[in-house]
Image: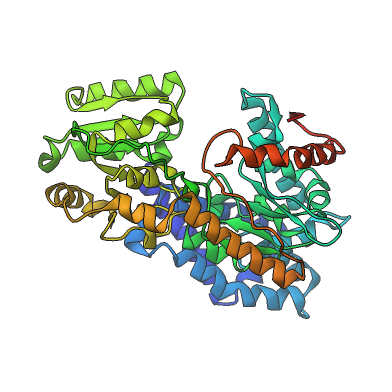
Amino acid sequence: MVSQSSAFHEALEILDDFFHLMDSGRLFTLKDPDAYRRLRRRVRRALFTVLMEGRPRLENLRGLSWPYDALLRNRSYLETVARGASPAEDRLQARLFLALLPFPGQWRELLRLENRTDRHPEIVSLLAEEQRKIDAKIVKKRQKTFRLRHFCQILKVPRPPAEKGVLRIFSLPYLFRIPGLLKRISKEYVIYMEPPWGVLARHAWLRVFSDLEDPCLIGAGGPEDRRFLETQAGVVPVPLAHGDYLEEDGTVPLGAEKRFDIVFNGLYDDMPRKRHNLLLELLCRPELSRLTALFIGRGASRHVAAFRRQVGALGLENRVTVRDNLPRREVPRYLARCRMGVHLALHENVCRSIYECFRSDIPCLVSSAMAGFDFHQITPQNGVVAPDDALPAAVCRMLDHLDPFSPRKWFLDHSGCRNNSRRLNDHLKVLFERQGYPWENDIVLLGSSGANRYVDPEDYRRFRPAFHALLAVFREFPLPLAVVPE
């Protein structure tokens, strides 16, 4: 089995060779068209390796922006070949590089090749692979019947003939890949879409949201993701996504007796991404050997059981408490008994659990390798950002100096559903003005959880007629899941 370190360095070498071929102008000296296909496949896998599993190593060696900087630097070279007087085969290969790798402007290039009647075999293969992944997601869904409010939320109703509504898509985004569905909805709604996690590994998959009558607002918490989105035609990235709309909740318990030094809130079904192992390793270090930790999160019973066995194998049963599948309303009660939070995920899109710590007045330590979060949100008032090798010292320092932190005050002053709903409203008003649409009514307050995510239940009741009209639109298309009346 190839170690993670070996796989990372192999991926780095593949990318170095690829970027050197472009920098030197020798990329199109290959004579076998199949060699280009193999090269694109290797580069895609290498990018996934270094930007996902290898993020902490990439941060230390090259910096997290290095692959994107190299792609940006070489785009003009490929553009020149694709649009110039080069041989036809070279022009085709250049277009395929621009369309199948996350170069600036990738989505428009991919849509051009996808819409051709004579689709290239690599494009056909990509479409088939995407469909297989979507089919697999649908098969895995335990819930097979949905109401619209389970995956989208009307924020503002359309007022024909001139004023469009606003539709928030917060779940099942792959449902909207059905040909024609999004374009039909966009006749009446401007779309605000929140990927379940950042666009980091789904650059091509989200292209359908960039091909609408009006630009689509895409909520992307991380600057890395927003920089990529800013290069795509037809989308407007905004630094807001689901975790930003956490309800303020005045019933959150404060001042409870502290029973745990650290709390780690992460999905047990996704432990490699959340990096449960890393915190267990930290707890085994001599300087942290007396600390207690609470692990909470959702997940299948088999995954929770596997994690409990891991805790036992390390001899941490007396210092680590594991809780799973707590109702959301109970999470603040557990957080209140902890002194600080730790979040080590490799990638997110924003992150609800970080804000939950702030709301419960506990500071949070966040890994600087994490994608999908804006570290400007971490201030001396609410937490610390640190690279992996500095995490142990950061934990000790925070626990020894908790008094200066006031995370709940920061949360109420700068974040939460009211502050961030207002910010989203401002982004939308600018877009409406740019598109020449009137703006008579503001959007309603957004929440971050629940079946419909309305902070005020009355908003949902008021919008029921609009939901019924939207359901009629969905029923014009062959849906892979059952969507029933509200």
Query: 117 and 229: which one is in front?
Result: 229
Residue occupying image coordinates x 78% and y 80%: 85
Tell me the residue at 72%/66% (across/down): 95
Residue 294, visible in the rendered structure = yes
Which of 353/443 is in front?
Answer: 443
Whether residue 97 is visible to the viewer of this picture, yes or no, is no
Q: Is residue 320 left or right of residue 436?
A: left
Looking at the rendering, in which quadrant would you find the C terminus?
Answer: top right
Q: Where residue 337 sits in the image (x, y, percent)?
A: 24, 33
Image location of residue 34, percent across then percent down: 69, 55
Q: Nearer the viewer, residue 25 or 328?
A: 328
Q: Is residue 200 above or below residue 476?
A: below
Residue at image position (59%, 33%) is: 451
Q: How is the image coloured?
A: rainbow
Task: Quarter of the image for the N terminus: give it.
Answer: top left
Total numbered labels: 0
Q: Is residue 139 above or below residue 183?
A: above
Whether residue 419 sits left or right of residue 98 in the image: it is: left
Question: Relative to 48, does residue 360 appear above or below in the rendering?
Answer: above
Q: Say which of 126 and 360 sits in front.
A: 360
Q: Position of residue 352 (x, y in %)?
A: 44, 44
- The picture quadrant where one finds residue 25 is bottom right
Where does the image place residue 26, in percent across and percent down from the top left? Answer: 60, 74
Residue 229 quadrant: bottom right
Asked where in the image residue 103 lies, by quadrant, the reply is: bottom right
Q: Does 65 sit left or right of 455 as displayed?
A: left
Q: Residue at x 31, y 37 (%)?
A: 264
